[in-house]
Amino acid sequence: MKIKTAEFIISNTDIKKCPKPDKPEYAFIGRSNVGKSSLINMLTGRKQLAKISGKPGKTRLINHFLINEEWYLVDLPGYGYAKVSKKERNIWKGFIKDYILTRENLMNLFVLIDSRHNPQKNDLEFMQRLGENQVAFVIIFTKADKLTKKQLKENILHYKTKLLKIWEEMPVFFISSAVDKSGREEILDFIGETNTLF
Ligand code: GDP
């Protein structure tokens, strides 16, 4: 898929104020610092569409972007940042949970995982919750450029082993790097194909 246009539409914490659900929508979520903003900017080819901050306590909002006037890209708040309150750390609460469970045009949730790290409890629990609630999701292993091919393969294998304790099958996954743009075509093609199901 070619990205022709990408525009910011609205930020809010109220699912009722999200744009009319008349277009397919894809949301991105992950632990703070996982590389979510960098990935969104890489996918859309817009350097500053999502704010790369790395700062804790970044405003926690649901950010809607309209892509090619055809589908919505949604930047959800990062979770698990140690320096925010426990309440804020729990992703499975409040407006984010409401959004994930009730947004009717949500075609897929991209769950970002830093490919360098060992499987983290809150990521695994989060995915389990998605499964229990039949929310369609795909994993994106980020920052692949930071690892050698061998390390990357080993880490993903390790992740698979963990996930297969919970899941019968390995969820679909992509590997990405905002530095060398790997994964870009595959992710955009996946979105393009999924759009046809809307
Ligand atoms: P967010 O908090 O999940 O939105 O993460 P950011 O996109 O702000 O990235 C956090 C940090 O990781 C920043 O310093 C980025 O430059 C860096 N980063 C993000 N993606 C990549 C990547 O694919 N490769 C490398 N090497 N660094 C990355």
Image: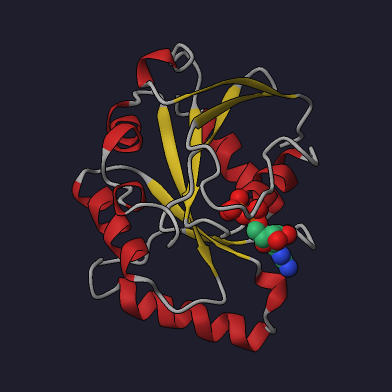
Q: Quadrant of residue 144?
A: bottom right
Left or right: where 67 falls relative to 197 = right
Residue 117 sits above or below residue 96 on the image: below
Residue at 67% of width from left, 39% of height from top?
Answer: 50
Residue 159 sits above or below residue 110 on the image: below
Residue at 26% of width from left, 41% of height from top?
Answer: 93
| Residue 13 place in picture, x, y as percent | 41, 26
Furthest-left residue in this view: 132
Q: How many marks?
A: 0
Q: How is the image coloured?
A: secondary structure
Q: Say which of 35 and 3 sits in front.
A: 35
Residue 106 sits above or below residue 23 on the image: below
Residue at 35% of width from left, 47% of height from top?
Answer: 88
Residue 105 sits above or below residue 126 on the image: above
Left or right: where 74 falls relative to 87 = right
| Residue 126 place in picture, x, y as percent | 31, 56
Q: Quadrant of the C terminus?
A: top left
Residue at 57% of width from left, 38% of height from top?
Answer: 191
| Residue 136 place in picture, x, y as percent | 35, 44
Q: Say which of 33 and 84 sits in front.
A: 84
Q: Say which of 82 and 96 sits in front.
A: 82
Locate ligand 1 by image quadrant.
Answer: bottom right
The reply to whether residue 120 is visible in this rendering is yes
| Residue 49 place in picture, x, y as percent | 72, 35
Q: Say which of 72 and 60 sits in front.
A: 60
The reply to whether residue 182 is visible in this rendering is no
Q: Quadrant of the N terminus?
A: top right
